[in-house]
Image (spheres, rainbow, N blue to C red):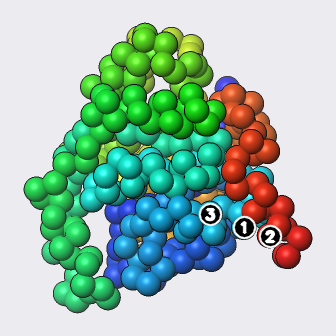
Amino acid sequence: MSAIIITCAVTGSVHTPTMSPYLPITPADIAREGVAAAEAGAAILHLHARDPRDGRPSADPALFMAFLGTIGARCDAVANITTGGSALMSLDERLAGPREASPEMCSLNLGSMNFGLFGAATRYESWQHDWEKPFLEGTRDMIFRNTFRDIETIFEEMGAARGARFEFECYDVGHLYTLAHFADRGLIEPPFFIQFVLGILGGIGADVDNLVHMRHIADKLFGDRYLFSVLAAGRHQIPMTTAAAAMGGHVRVGLEDNLYIDRGTLAKSNAEQVRRIRDIVEGLGRTVATPDEARRLLNLKGRDRTAFQANAQHDGRQA
């Protein structure tokens, strides 16, 4: 088996500030959490931005650049910038940060889908900010949009124009066939880094049978031209990533996907989750990949070709 890539999704756009005092909000929070996760063993950092005033998801490129420079100065992890942003954002808004940053990697959702977060709106009696509950309840009647044209635009702007490669987020089996369609057209080149996303309401459920099926279909469609990783929502995070590691796959953890470290116990940091899965995968006999090993496995362009590297060098001199 190759070295296992640990991805850490640092903050995301799903959870809200009321849910955990440990959720990173400001650029300084996100940078600090990202660096600590990298030091704990994460080779890739999956990154969103939030409005530092109230924690809502943000598409502001200045916020992305504010934490990317610091992260780049203080660790060598691969920065993987979201193109998903939030279901409330237009495609143009979702691409604003990635366009500015020109990162080594971007995430890419392989389809439009229901993305139900409304169940969380019933779990809290009071909220820190007035946007949180309506945001969650609104997902009952909201679709995350990524049409074939949207996906083509992301390939053109982030892949062809900027040299980024992708974390292909596949929430169901049909997304694998969509990815195969674009591969057959020659719009993307292997190796494909496929993230099986399990346990989101609107996508495939988080159980081992589904994981095995997703891998079977990916094997049929892509043969030896892909690497798979697994993220699972909430309480499914560690069991499903453990199964992925045992199957020879890669893993993703982080506060974007799960706020807890044990049943009823909030994780105090992203690094805590990275250390937990690192202990597990090393116990299974897997070697944890360094950022440079991840770059070689995924054929990434390198940090020196990102737009934020100059910021990283400047922050490094100031550190």
Of the residues under marks 3 and 1, which one precedes in the sequence? 3
Which residue is denoted by mark 3 in the rendering?
A: 65
Q: Is residue 235 visible?
A: no
**Which amino acid type is shown beneath numbered disc 2?**
Asp
Disc 3 and disc 1 in contact, CB within 8 angstroms: no
Residue 256 placement, left or right of 164: left
Of the residues under marks 2 and 1, which one precedes in the sequence? 1
* Residue depicted at 43% across the width and 62% down the height: 59
Which residue is denoted by mark 1 in the rendering?
A: 70
Q: Gap between marks 2 and 1, in whole Å?
A: 6 Å
- Which quadrant of the structure image shows residue 72? bottom right
**Which amino acid type is shown beneath numbered disc 3?**
Met
Name the spot of residue 116 as percent of width and height, x first: 20, 55
* Residue depicted at 43% across the width and 10% down the height: 184
Residue neighbourhood size for the residue with mark 2, other residues' Cα within 10 Å, grouped as few (<14), some (14–19), many (≥20):
some
Name the spot of residue 105 as percent of width and height, x first: 59, 41
Which residue is denoted by mark 2 in the rendering?
A: 315
Tag 2, which secondary structure? helix
Name the quarter where the C terminus is drawn.
bottom right
Q: Nearer the viewer, mark 3 or mark 1?
A: 3
Residue neighbourhood size for the residue with mark 1, other residues' Cα within 10 Å, grouped as few (<14), some (14–19), many (≥20):
many
Name the spot of residue 43 as percent of width and height, x first: 68, 48
Q: Gap between marks 3 and 1, in whole Å?
A: 9 Å
Of the residues under marks 2 and 3, which one precedes in the sequence? 3
Q: Residue furthest left?
A: 141
Residue 167 placement, left or right of 148: right
* Residue depicted at 49% across the width and 30% down the height: 156
Disc 2 and disc 3 in contact, CB within 8 angstroms: no
Q: Say if 37 sits above or below 150 in the image.
A: below
Name the quarter where the N terminus is drawn.
top right
Looking at the image, which is closer to me, 245 or 35?
35
